[in-house]
Image (cartoon, rainbow, N blue to C red):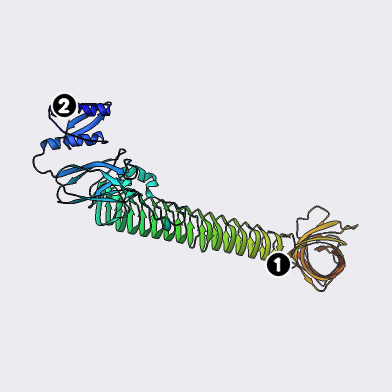
Amino acid sequence: MSEIEKQADFNFSYNSQQIATDKTVTLSLRNESVRTALYHLFGNSVEARQKGEHLVLKKTVEIAQQAHRKSKYVVSGYIIDARNGNRMSNVSVYDNSRSYAAVSDDFGFYSITLPSEKNIAGLTYSRKNYSDTIIVIKPVDDMNINIFMREEIRDLEKINPITETVENRVEETGLVKIMVPGTQAIHAENVTQLEQRKVQVSLLPMIGTNAFMSGVIENKVSVNIFGGYSGGVNGLEIGGFFNIVRKDVKGVQLAGFTNITGGKTNGTQLAGFFNNNRGSMYGVQAAGFNNFVMDTMKGLQAAGFNNIIVGRLDGIQAAGFNNIATNNSDGIQVAGFSNFAMKDLNKAQLAGFMNYAGNARGIQLAGFCNIARNEMSGTQVSGFFNYGTVVKGLQLSLAMNVDVKEMTGTQIAGIMNIGGKIKGTQIGFLNFADSVSGATIGFFSFVRKGYHEVEVTANETFFLNASFKTGTHKFYTIFTSSFFPSSQNKGWSIGYGIGSDFRAGEKLRINLDLTGSQINEGIAWTPRLNMLNKARLNLGVQLFKGVYFVIGPEFNIQLSQLQDAENNRLGKVYAPYTFYDKDTRGTNLQMWLGGNIGFRL
C-alpha cells in the first residue's frame, strides 16, 4: 500500500482495526489503475472514496457479515476501446433479462449487481456505433472483468450517399429531460432492439417493473400510475399524468395530462392537456388544449385550443381556436378563430375569423377573411374580405374581394371588387379590374382596358346633357347631368344609369341606356320628387378615331310631386307634348317619346 501511495502520489486513510496492515501479499501489476490494484488486494470487501488528497478505505458491511454463498454478487471493471485503448463512458451494461443494468462512468468503470439465482448469466455491453459485446459468467463470487469493445466498421462499397435526416427524439422535449433520468436515456440510445413484454406497471419512469431499461422495452399493456417511459406500445397504455414512448404506439394511449411519442402512432391518442407526436399519426388524436404532430396526420385531430401538423394533413383538424398544417392539407380544417394550410388545401377550411392557404382547391368559409396566397380553385365566402392571386370559381364577401392576376368566375361583394384579368362577372357597389371579358355590375365600375366614354347631347327637354360612361361594352354605368337655363325655368339635373354597347358594323355602334335624373329648379336641390327617367336607343357613327356622331329615340317617364303654379296643376311640364298625363296619390306621371342628338368621345 505504501508503494501504491508513492506511485500514485496520494495517501490512504483507513481504520487499522479493519485493515490488516501486517498481512503479507504478493501482487504484480503493470499499467493498471489504483482501483484494479485495490480489487486484487481486497476484492469487494473494501470501499474506496476520494477526499482531497486522501483515498479513504472502509470495510463493507455486506462482506463483513457474509457467511455462506451470497444472494447477490458484483461484476465490475473497465470498458476500453480496443482500437485506441481509451476508456469508454456511457456504455450500457445489462443482463439478458434486462432487469439489471448499469452505465460506465467518465473513467470507463462499471459496476453491476446481479442475483446469484442462476448458475449461468449473460451480460451485454452496448454503446451507440459500437458492436455489442456479450459474455457469459458463472455467479460464484464478485469478479473484476475488463471489456474491450470495437467500433462498428461499415462496408465502404455499400455506403449510400449521405442525406441529411432529422431525428425527432422524445429526449429533446423539456418534460422528458426533467422526468427521465440520464441513465435511462443512455440505455435507450445504446440499445437498438426493443424487447417485447406483456405488462408493465410504473410509478415514475425510473420506478417500475421495467426499471432503468424501460426505454428499450415494448409493452402490450402499460400502466403508469403517475408517468412512464417506454420503448414502444402495442396495445394499451394508461398514464395518470404522462406517457412517454420513444418509438411507435399501436393501439390506445390515454393520459391525464400529456402523451409524448417519438415514432408512429396508429390508433387513438387522448390527453387531458396536450399530445406531442414526433412522428406520424394515423387515427384519432384528441386533447383538451393542444395537439402537435411532426409528420403526417391521417384521421381526426381535435383540440380545445390548437392543432399543429408539421407534415401533411389527410383528414380533419378541429380546434376551438386555431389549426396549422405546414405542408399540404388534403382534408378539412375547422376552427373557432383561424386555419392555416401553408401549402395546398384540397378540401375545405371553416373558421370564425380567418382562413389562409398557399393554394386552395375547395371551399374557404370565414367570418372575416379568406386568403389564398397563390391559386384559388373553388369558393371563398367571408364576412369582410377574400383574397387570391389566381382565382377560378366564386368570391363572395359582404365587403371586398381581391383577385391580383386573373379571375375566372364571379366576384360578388357588398362594397368593392378588385380584379386583374376578369373572365366572368363582377357584382358589387364598386368594381375595379384590369380587363373584363364578361360583365361588371355595380354603382361604379372601372376597367382599365374597358369602356370609357363621354357623351354630349341635346334633346327636346334640355338643350345640354353630359354623360360619363365607364365599365365594359356589355355592361357600363352612366353618370349624367343636364342643364336648362331659360327665362322662366332655370335649373339642372343629376342622374345615374346603366347601359350596354353593341357593334353593328365596322364604324357603327348601338347603345341601349337606362337613366334616372332628379330635376332641380331655382335652388341647389329640390327636396321633393321630380324625376325624369329615360330609355334611350342610340346609333353611333364613327367620324374619326375615338369620335362618334350619335342620334336616337328616347322614351321618357316623368314622376313629379311639385306644384306648377303657372299652369295651376300638379307636376312640372318640361316636354312639348305627352301621350300620358295622370295624377295618382299626390304624384304626377307623364310619358312621351322624344329623341337626342350629339357626339361621343
- List the single residue furthest toward the right: 487
Q: Is residue 103 above or below residue 572?
A: above
User: Mark 2 or mark 1, which is nearer to you?
Assistant: 2
What is the x, y in percent for residue 108?
Answer: 29, 40
Question: In the image shown, does 481 or 186 lie closer to the viewer?
Answer: 186
Type of the residue with mark 1 = Ser
Q: Which residue is mark 1?
A: 437
Residue under the image location 70 percent in, 66 percent down: 439
Q: Is residue 582 above or below residue 216?
A: below
What is the x, y in percent for residue 21?
Answer: 14, 27
Question: Which label was assigned to residue 210?
Answer: none
- Tell me if mark 1 has few (under 14), some (14-19) or many (20+) residues whose alpha carbon lies within 10 angstroms of its own: some
Type of the residue with mark 2 = Asn
Question: In the image shown, does 309 or 554 lie closer to the viewer?
Answer: 309
Using the numbered discs, state the Cα–Cα distance from disc 2 to disc 1 in whole angstroms: 105 Å
- Upstream in the sequence, badge 2 or badge 1? 2
542 left or right, relative to 241: right
Q: Is residue 572 above or below residue 186?
A: below
Residue under the image location 46 percent in, 60 percent down: 313
Quadrant hosting residue 395: bottom right
Question: In the image shown, does 87 or 239 lie closer to the viewer?
Answer: 87
Quadrant hosting residue 56: top left
Quarter of the image containing the N terminus?
top left
Say how many tags the image has. 2
**Badge 1 element:** loop
Viewer can see residue 581 = no
What is the x, y in percent for residue 565?
Answer: 84, 60
Q: Which residue is mark 2?
A: 15
**Badge 2 element:** loop
